[in-house]
Image (spheres, coloured by chain):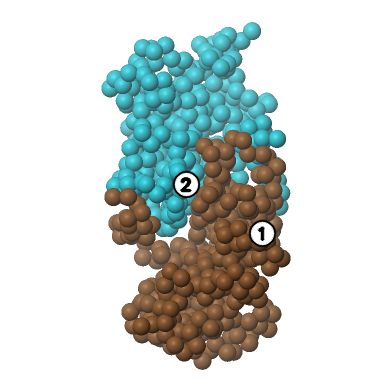
Chain colours: A brown, B cyan
């Protein structure tokens, strides 16, 4: 039987239960954005790691080495942000083909450093080795948070608002520009930039985790269609999402209309937005949004609600139920 | 300029000083087997990560998946052992070609679990993803130690004995059996097993770190010729090593004599022994060795001594100075 038959989640399910016997009760977080390792009653470490392989996660001809260095760290910091924790240390393993130019690597480290400096996260170690042909990058980040403030996927409650911290679909749009060979207008180039230089929501995540009304939280790496389902499964809840409420940037709107893209499909399933997806006690959302705008100068977006039921998303478009298909969302029959 | 011109250490030197500005004074360990992250005055976390890439670090046709799973964790636990710390948690990133059999992955996880269970180290997270063609494995391990007990490469002192915890060269001999297509006698197969199933010296490392006479310590991953030089550079010391004192197993002796191998070369430079290399206050060594034998049922080996001077190794063979060459050790002219 080949891996593609059962998929990566199917593979993880084959060994995870056995390993869980070894886990100390005070620790946890398997299936969350980070593992949670309790240091003491007050403080926990959170740990995440992400593997990026050339031609699977990035195309060397499209992303500059500086952007790649930045993004390699950013996707990990985003997982720390999703827990509501502060990143402390990073570790970089890099497998390098022999013919790689040192200047390429210097630029990679420049991008990695830029983000390290921005959030005060030192690179503390790693592994530098040869690779047969493709560039391989693994980053691990350790963060720290107040044990009681950490937010997990399992914390959604009935009646919660489903919210996101920013535009959805720009990164997926950027990938589509590259893969479809779309004309590189200024807007199309901005979408590519969103794909190559995601900004981890560190300060936003820390702040949200300190607000009592905020329940479940994660970052959007695969698109809300997949990611919200993780929250629903972990919390044993159902959700309704209103497509017309998904925040879409003007540039995605413009490029999408020019090329007849399925914009709702990109906003819900494009992936790699690295915005925060979270649930909030219903009557706390408006004040939270006002406070968030005051602090960060940008709004939160209410895109749906949590309810009792089997873990699944009901999609609505202007009050009419629709179903997700390969081509986007169709009227429910 | 290509990477091969400056090598991996040359590359690290290009960015490490810049990043060191971001490191908190209480933390450290860059250049050691693990990074040291101080939790409080008494306790520190230590962190290591190792990247293994198919056709660079292992040959899929030679190593069984179960052995590969075991070894992927073992090489990291060995770094924790080298600090004198207790391993606590592991994180596994794995990039898998699409045509990989699930049974292969199950066996890999079985080997990984065997060692996890042996030392009570739970797998707490990671990343499972596609790879274009080659299997890619990155393991990160977090350990914990008493801050004052941790052993670093910089701790060697004048007059120390240089010691190792077991046989040298078996693993390098096993690799040579595979690469040279040597006949697979029972002894040759045992050498291959040493290469594929290294045993991390966790308990030995913890015990040694609690002995006051033990100074610098590291694990032997590249061979003592390279690894002892790391200790000498970090400690600003010189060493003399006596080739006739290097502990060589009977099986390496036998296979080596059959095929006219340079056994001193394998013992000093073969690599991947994953024994401990450490320095001990001269007058403490005999008692330490007696206590070690009592506790672990095997001896330590005194292979040389530390002295003042530029960081380099003087090699002696039965009282005569020799120099390292491509073919082994030649008389010093």
**Quadrant in the picture for residue B158:** top right
Mark 1 is surrounded, within 10 Å at the Cα level, by few (under 14), some (14 to 19) or many (20 or more) other residues, namely many
Q: Which residue is mark 2?
A: B132
Viewer-closest of B271 and B107: B107
* Residue A302 appears in view: yes
Q: Quadrant of residue B75?
A: top left
- Where is residue A234? Give x, y as percent: 38, 73
Q: Is residue B142 left or right of residue B16?
A: left
Dot 1: chain letter: A
Q: Nearer the viewer, mark 2 or mark 1?
A: 2
- Image position of A163 (left or right of B71): right
Q: Is residue B78 above or below residue A76?
A: above
Answer above or below: position of B67 versus A48: above
- Residue pushed farthest bottom? A283
- Image position of A208 with respect to A60: above or below: below
- Foreground residue, A300 or A205? A300
At 66% across and 50% down in the image, what residue appears?
A: A65
Q: Is residue A155 visible?
A: no
Give coordinates of residue B217: x percent, y percent.
52, 37
Circle on res. A115: 1
**Which of the numbered marks, if any, corresponds to residue A60?**
none
On the image, the x and y values in percent for residue B258 come to 36, 12
Label 2 and label 1 in one chain: no
> In which quadrant of the rendered image does the C terminus of chain A lie?
bottom left
Q: Position of residue B262 (x, y in %)?
A: 46, 15
Q: Are marks 2 and 1 in contact (CB under 8 Å)?
A: no
- The answer for how far apart the CA atoms under marks 2 and 1 are is 28 Å
Residue appearing at x 61%, y 74% in the figure: A257
Secondary structure of the residue carrying numbered label 1 = helix
- Residue drawn at x 66%, y 76% is A250
């Amino acid at each position: 039987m080949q891996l593609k038959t059962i998929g990566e989640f199917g593979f993880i399910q084959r060994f995870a239960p056995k390993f869980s016997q070894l886990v100390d009760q005070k620790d946890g977080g398997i299936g969350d954005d980070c593992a949670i390792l309790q240091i003491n009653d007050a403080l926990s470490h959170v740990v995440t790691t992400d593997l990026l392989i050339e031609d699977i996660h990035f195309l060397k001809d499209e992303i500059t080495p500086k952007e790649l260095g930045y993004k390699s760290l950013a996707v990990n910091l985003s997982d720390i942000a999703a827990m509501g924790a502060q990143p402390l240390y990073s570790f970089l393993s890099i497998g390098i083909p022999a013919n790689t130019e040192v200047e390429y690597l210097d630029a990679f480290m420049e991008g990695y450093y830029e983000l390290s400096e921005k959030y005060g996260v030192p690179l503390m170690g790693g592994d530098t080795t040869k690779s047969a042909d493709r560039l391989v990058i693994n980053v691990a980040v350790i963060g720290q948070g107040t044990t009681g403030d950490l937010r997990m996927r399992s914390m959604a409650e009935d009646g919660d608002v489903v919210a996101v911290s920013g535009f959805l679909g720009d990164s997926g749009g950027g990938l589509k520009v590259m893969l479809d060979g779309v004309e590189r207008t200024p807007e199309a180039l901005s979408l590519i930039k969103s794909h190559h230089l995601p900004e981890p929501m560190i300060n936003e995540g820390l702040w949200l985790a300190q607000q009592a009304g905020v329940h479940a939280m994660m970052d959007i790496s695969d698109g809300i269609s997949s990611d919200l389902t993780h929250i629903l499964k972990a919390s044993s809840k159902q959700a309704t999402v209103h497509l017309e409420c998904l925040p879409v940037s003007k540039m995605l709107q413009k490029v999408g209309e020019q090329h007849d893209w399925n914009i709702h499909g990109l906003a819900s399933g494009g992936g790699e937005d690295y915005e925060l997806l979270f649930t909030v006690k219903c009557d706390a959302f408006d004040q939270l949004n006002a406070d968030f705008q005051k602090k960060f100068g940008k709004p939160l977006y209410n895109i749906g609600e949590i309810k009792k039921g089997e873990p699944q998303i009901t999609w609505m478009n202007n009050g009419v139920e629709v179903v997700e298909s390969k081509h986007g969302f169709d009227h429910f029959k």
